[in-house]
Amino acid sequence: MKKIFLLPFLFSLLLTSAQPIPVLAQSPGIAQQTGLDQALQRKHWQTEKVSRGMRWKYYHGNGLFDSRQSISVLDINLRKAGIALSFAYSDSTRIKTSTFAREQNALAAINGSYFDVKNGGSVNFFRTGGQVNASTTPQMAAYRENAAIAVDAAGKPQIIRKPEAGWESTAIPDVLSSGPLLVFGGEKETMVQQAFNTNRHPRTAIGITKDNHLLLVTVDGRSAEAQGMSNEELALLMQALGCTEALNLDGGGSTTMWIEGKGTEGIVNYPSDNKVYDQKGERAVANSVLIVKRHRK
């Protein structure tokens, strides 16, 4: 039986203008070596307004990490009124991120954390409203569930490390675990030297900036037009985009960004599950992160 869980929260009413792609805050050596200083210049990005406080930014070009990259960034100003974050989840069947989004009248969505490809359902710790929907399977590597995107009782989104006593010990009511943690406290995390981290793949990430913006990011891959990133490279990208905290979500064929009214039927990145560089290769998943409009009572 399909179950869908939604976790909305209302952001504060302070209004500020949308921010451009930030200037790289790296040492000159790192900037020159990775190409981030050039790639993050505003002129290289296409930018479209999604709604108040939300901008979709797209980069497609050469030179970043000495490779060809295709990157979508949904930049959400958390101080804009009427925006809510939700998790959609099915415990019995896999559902496309775009379907989750349309069913819940979302403004935007990205795929969530890891899942059982054959049977559906999350394989990482996942709790909504204080109720545990899934626990981490014994086979899951520790670095792939060492952090989480969480929503506290006051409705504030945050990226947290896994407690030493385990996920069940945290009092935060809404937690979707994933990993590896990319950036924390403004510092890039050290990556476990495993192929999952060191090889280039499509990637999905979520981050929070110092000036209170939520960034949803997809990096396309497995194509001559989009070579993907290692998690080391992804961490550098998220840090350069201004994230003080950032988390890797499920990637590979699952990597999907959907924005209402944009792209091909809402798909704005180039999902790789069909092994073609187009916008038709979306994979069905077990959970997704949605951005929805909060209706006033």
Image (tube, rainbow, N blue to C red):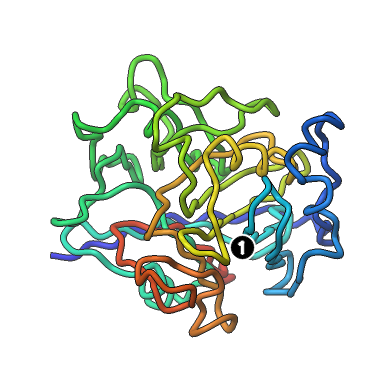
Which x, y percent locates residue 97?
Answer: 39, 67
Q: Is residue 241 left or right of residue 221?
A: right
**Amino acid type assigned to the residue bearing label 1 in the image:** Ser
| Residue that sits furthest to the top in the current view | 164
The answer, for residue 297, to whether it is visible in the render is no
Q: Identify the residue shown where x is 46% and y is 50%.
A: 201
Q: Is residue 171 left or right of residue 246?
A: left
Seen from the viewer's position, the closer of residues 103 and 32 is 32
Task: Report the number of discs.
Answer: 1
Quarter of the image with the C terminus in it: bottom right
Q: Is residue 275 left or right of residue 8?
A: left
Q: Identify the residue shown where x is 34% and y is 27%.
A: 167
Q: Is residue 32 left or right of residue 222?
A: right
Q: Kindly indicate the quadrant of the structure image that contains residue 83.
A: bottom right
Residue 216, compared with residue 169, is above or below; it is below
Residue identified by numbered label 1: 70
Residue 97, compared with residue 231, is above or below; it is below
Residue 137, compared with residue 275, is above or below; it is above
Disc 1 secondary structure class: strand
Seen from the viewer's position, the closer of residues 290 and 61 is 61
Residue 238, compared with residue 140, is above or below; it is below
Which x, y percent locates residue 89?
Answer: 31, 58
Which x, y percent locates residue 259?
Answer: 56, 73
Q: Kindly indicate the quadrant of the structure image that contains residue 254.
A: bottom left
